[in-house]
Amino acid sequence: MAKASTADGTMTIGDTGTKTKKSDKTKSGGAGKPAKPGVFARLAQYMRDVRSEMKRVVWPQRPEVLNSSMVVAVTLIFFAAFTFFTDAIVVWALGLLTGTGK
C-alpha cells in the first residue's frame, strides 16, 4: 500500500482513494478528555481544599511546643560546641604535625 501526503493535509491511503484530513483526526468530538477548568477555577478549588485540610490538622498544645523547642535548642547548642571543640583539636594537632603551632 502506498501512502502519500499533500500540501493541504490530505492523505491518500492505498488504492481505495479514501482521503482523510489530519485536522479531522485532531478535532474528534466528545471522545477525548473533558475540558480543563480555567486557572481561577482551579485556584479557587485549591484554596477550598487547603481550608478543608487545615480544619483537620491537630495542632499541638503550648507545653508540647515548648518541650520540642527546648529539645531543638539543646541539640543545637550541643552540636555547635562539639563542632567548635573538634575543629580546635584538629587545628591544634595539625599545627603540631606541620610545625606551625605556637
Image (spheres, grey):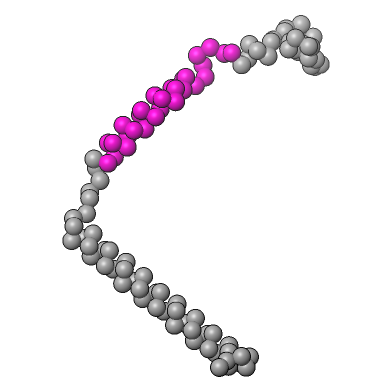
Image coordinates for residue 90, horizontal then vertical, percent: 53, 85
Image coordinates for residue 16, horizontal then vertical, percent: 76, 7
Q: Is residue 46 left or right of residue 63?
A: right
Q: Which residues are magenta?
A: 27-54
Q: Is residue 61 above or below residue 5?
A: below
Task: Name the foreground residue: 40 vs 17.
Answer: 40
Image coordinates for residue 12, horizontal then vertical, percent: 77, 11
Please give the name of the residue rendered at 32% of the width and 66% of the height, measured from the top-left corner: 72
Q: Is residue 88 left or right of residue 18?
A: left
Residue 93 found in image quarter: bottom right
- Counting every numbered tag in the picture gives 0
Image coordinates for residue 27, horizontal then vertical, percent: 59, 13
Residue 50 found in image quarter: top left
Please give the name of the residue rendered at 63% of the width and 11% of the height, measured from the top-left corner: 24
Task: Name the foreground residue: 52 vs 17.
Answer: 52
Q: Is residue 25 left or right of residue 45?
A: right
Q: Is residue 5 above or below residue 52?
A: above
In the displayed image of the protein, which residue is found farthest to the front?
102
Q: Is residue 34 rendered magenta in the image?
A: yes
Quadrant of the rendering where the C terminus is positioned: bottom right
Q: Is residue 86 rendered magenta in the image?
A: no
Is residue 14 visible in the rendered image? The answer is no
Is residue 73 visible in the rendered image? The answer is yes
Q: Is residue 87 above or below residue 70?
A: below
Quadrant of the rendering where the N terminus is positioned: top right
Task: Name the foreground residue: 5 vs 62.
Answer: 62
Please give the name of the residue rendered at 21% of the width and 60% of the height, measured from the top-left corner: 64
